[in-house]
Amino acid sequence: MYITENQGRENMSVSVARYYKREKITLECKILTPMFLGDADQNAALSTAPIKAALRYWWRVSGLHQANGAEELFEKESSLFGSADEKFGKSHVSVSVEGMISPINEKFHSSHEIEHPEVDYKGSNKVKSLLYLANMGILKPSLEPRYKYLPTGKKFKIHFSFPKNLSDQLLPTLSMFLHLGSLGARSRNAWGSIGISSDTEFNSAKISPKNWEDLFDLDFPHGLGKDENGILLWESLKSYQKWEDAMHDLAKAYVKLRTGGFPFSPPPHKQPEPRHLLGYPITNHMVSPWGNTGRSASELRFTLKQKDNGLRIIVVHIPHLFDKKMIPQSTNLGIKAKQVEIWKK
């Protein structure tokens, strides 16, 4: 993915005109980690809805929309991808999937274990690393759940079609999806990672990252961040032959991040603490104002990608302000400078 940091931002507003000349792109995909991808009946199956959702997400992160607020972003996104509102009409982007994959329906076994300082089951603080990344990590070992998922190694194709006059927005979006994206539930934690190849050249796609601290102006993902060293993107030095080993090391690193960087205090918490802004909920940490219903996804996204005949762990930080509804800016942790300080640490 070629990304320039000095490229000037030109007016790239979406045209509502529909041209008969269309760009057609096919991505050949291989499942690298189990994919929790379901249909309306919660059955594991290939479907277009999660793909369209991923495309919308990476379009927002690309920053090509140049929106200055939620309302403007919604209108531009609806003009491009469609909306139930009649004034926007149908999506300009057509998506279809080719391939049949039989799902696995069994307990999601995980033999790899990691230590978690906030877990204690009969004197043991060990949890299954794969279940931890699948947001099942605080369950007792005897409660390993049964889930339907699409297995690794299977292949399928995604077909995209859109007007050529929208290529400046959609080719960079597909480039980000190709290099950073995963599909399905828990995809933020590298589940549903996919290896992608295409006969279309995406290297000419140009995206302009912004200074990461400036992206804390809005409380939702809306741009790609950079610092003095470049884009907020990291890749593991180690190459893995087994996806289970890569996910195990990722789980260890994530536990260390969530438990080792900030001071502990016993729950329940009457007010949120700095570590809660890394994503909520947190293992065994109940924050009174939020309870069981509070949700704020982490700004960190993980995926696995194929490189050098192996798998590399990819981490990307998508900076934005914490949900204003959960933490008003009138409080200490609601202040932009404080959240930037927490992420710097």
Image (cartoon, rainbow, N blue to C red):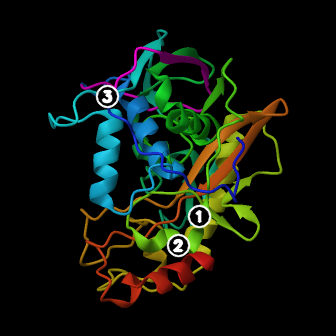
Residue type highlighted by circle 2: Asp
Residue at position x 37%, y 36% in the image: 15
Q: Horizontal placement of 208 versus 141: left or right?
A: right
Q: Horizontal placement of 121 versus 213: left or right?
A: left
Give the labeled residue for mark 2: 214
Residue at position x 60%, y 21% in the image: 29
Mark closest to the chain's N terminus, 2 or 3: 3
Quadrant of the image occupied by residue 304: top right
Quarter of the rendering occupied by the N terminus: top right
> Is residue 61 shown in magenta?
no
Give the labeled residue for mark 1: 210
Q: Are marks 1 and 3 in contact (CB under 8 Å)?
A: no
Q: Secondary structure at mark 1?
A: strand
Q: Are marks 2 and 1 in contact (CB under 8 Å)?
A: yes
Q: Nearer the viewer, residue 55 or 297?
A: 55
Give the labeled residue for mark 3: 91
Residue type highlighted by circle 3: Ser
When the figure is inspected, residue 231 is found, relative to residue 344, above or below; the finding is above
Quarter of the rendering occupied by the C terminus: bottom right
